[in-house]
Image (cartoon, rainbow, N blue to C red):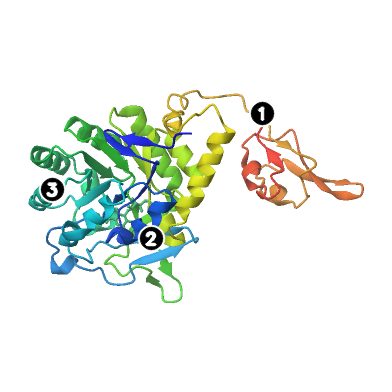
Amino acid sequence: MSLNTQVGTLKLQTPLLLASGYITETPEFFLRAQPYGCSGMITRSLKQHVPAERARVPAPRYAVFDQKSILACEWGNEKPWTDWKKHGVNQVKRTGCPIVISISGRDLDSCCNLIQSFDELGVDAYEINISCPHSGVLHGNLNIDTVHLRQVMQTVRKVTGTPIWIKLSYSNLLISMAKQAEELGANAIVCTNSIGPGMLIDTKTAKPKLGIKGGGGGVAGKAIFPIALWCVHQLSETLSIPVVGCGGIYTADDVIQMLMAGASAVQLYTAPALKGPKVFKRIMVDLQRFLTENPEYASVKDLIGFTLGKASDHKFSSPRPVVIEEKCTGCGTCVHSCAFDALSMIRRADRSPLAVIADNCISCNACVGVCPPKFGAIKASF
Ligand SMILES: Cc1cc2nc3c(=O)[nH]c(=O)nc-3n(C[C@H](O)[C@H](O)[C@H](O)COP(=O)(O)O)c2cc1C
């Protein structure tokens, strides 16, 4: 069973990469994740000069919510970019895995200088970050700035032959930005960066949970997975260059969905940041199990784009969901949640009550998702 994939010419042993952020300020976290199946890393978005007012956002810079998602307004570089040049790049290279240098795409001269400097070391790709949602609020939203994107691509494409990945975040202009990047010579699109800005308020103090001016941060982690997946699917339907999926990936099932939506590889940030590097091990075990149990997919590459072209059939038939009698415990969750009064409980002799679905069911299928997963007693019938 082959687990390898590639993003353009960049070969990867597995589809899993460590995304750019605080945990990629140095190679250490990647070096712990690599034995578990993480096949490459993207550095923190590097800046050549960090102006004093941007060195560090006032704390708090993170707010974890629902245990699997983060609101964050981090953007400084804790370590000088030269650390990567002196030893970081080589530490990653010694593992045999690729290293992608992420560069903050705001200052064009700095982009060029960094690229020229890292090209001497032979890095594998550059990821240009023009999609930080919280810095955008304060300093201009590059994620929807087509003029800036043109300037970035025209500038950096001239100075290097190394692959250039453009990292975008969800927006109304996502597809047109991505197409423009492709036309101007980008080798891949990475999507999505954290999405936002979003906000959380501490109700004890009535203050925003983040210390940044305005209180807005980027939303990352489980909360954004469906949006990220939609972005990847739309981009893959539209572009000829590879798409690298990112956003809310925690499980092998999430990875498989991203691949089926068209991603050539995926990046993870919040899951390893919150749960540790062993997240990669769990995903790899489950991914291999999926491929063994579904022999129609001989390899990871077979999964890529499997859903493309399949989202256009609009099915008008909507059969009612079905209650699996032996699994229903009569807990009543579905009855309480049905907005159409289409579910009720009937008594059963010597057994718990059973949910039944009436004729006024409109086949919304909400009850399928509402039934606690440990019971799984209602299934969709299409
Ligand atoms: C604390 C934090 C810092 C981040 N820093 C960067 C960064 O420096 N450059 C970048 O391109 N993306 C950065 N990101 C975005 C992640 O790389 C990733 O695109 C985003 O979090 C969505 O993936 P996830 O849901 O797996 O976290 C950061 C995210 C978080 C939560």
Q: Nearer the viewer, residue 92 or 249?
A: 92
Residue 234 place in picture, x, y as percent: 37, 33
Q: Amino acid at mark 2?
A: Leu
Q: CA distance from mark 3 to mark 2?
A: 30 Å
Residue 7 place in picture, x, y as percent: 31, 36
In the rendered view, would you say 81 is above or below 265? below
Q: Residue 50: in sight, yes or no?
A: yes
In the rendered view, would you say 201 is above or below 313? below
| Residue underneath mark 3 | 115
Image-quadrant location for residue 11: top left
Q: Indicate yes or no: mark 1 CB to ligand 1 under 8 Å.
A: no
At mark 3, the secondary structure is: helix
At mark 2, the secondary structure is: strand
* Viewer-nearest of discs 1 and 2: 2
Q: Which mark is residue 319?
A: 1
Residue furthest to the right in view is 349
Few, some or many residues within 10 Å of mark 2 (<14, 14–19, 20+): many
* Viewer-nearest of discs 3 and 2: 3
Q: Amino acid at mark 1?
A: Pro
Q: CA distance from mark 1 to mark 2?
A: 39 Å
Query: N-terminal of the two: label 3 or label 2?
Result: 2
Q: Which mark is residue 119?
A: none
* Quarter, ligand 1: bottom left
Query: Left of 328 or right of it: where is 212?
Result: left
Query: Left of 6 or right of it: where is 271?
Result: right
| Residue underneath mark 2 | 71
Q: CA distance from mark 1 to mark 3?
A: 56 Å
Question: Are discs 1 and 2 less than 8 Å apart at CB?
Answer: no
Residue 45 place in picture, x, y as percent: 23, 55
At mark 1, the secondary structure is: loop
Point out the image quarter for the C terminus.
top right
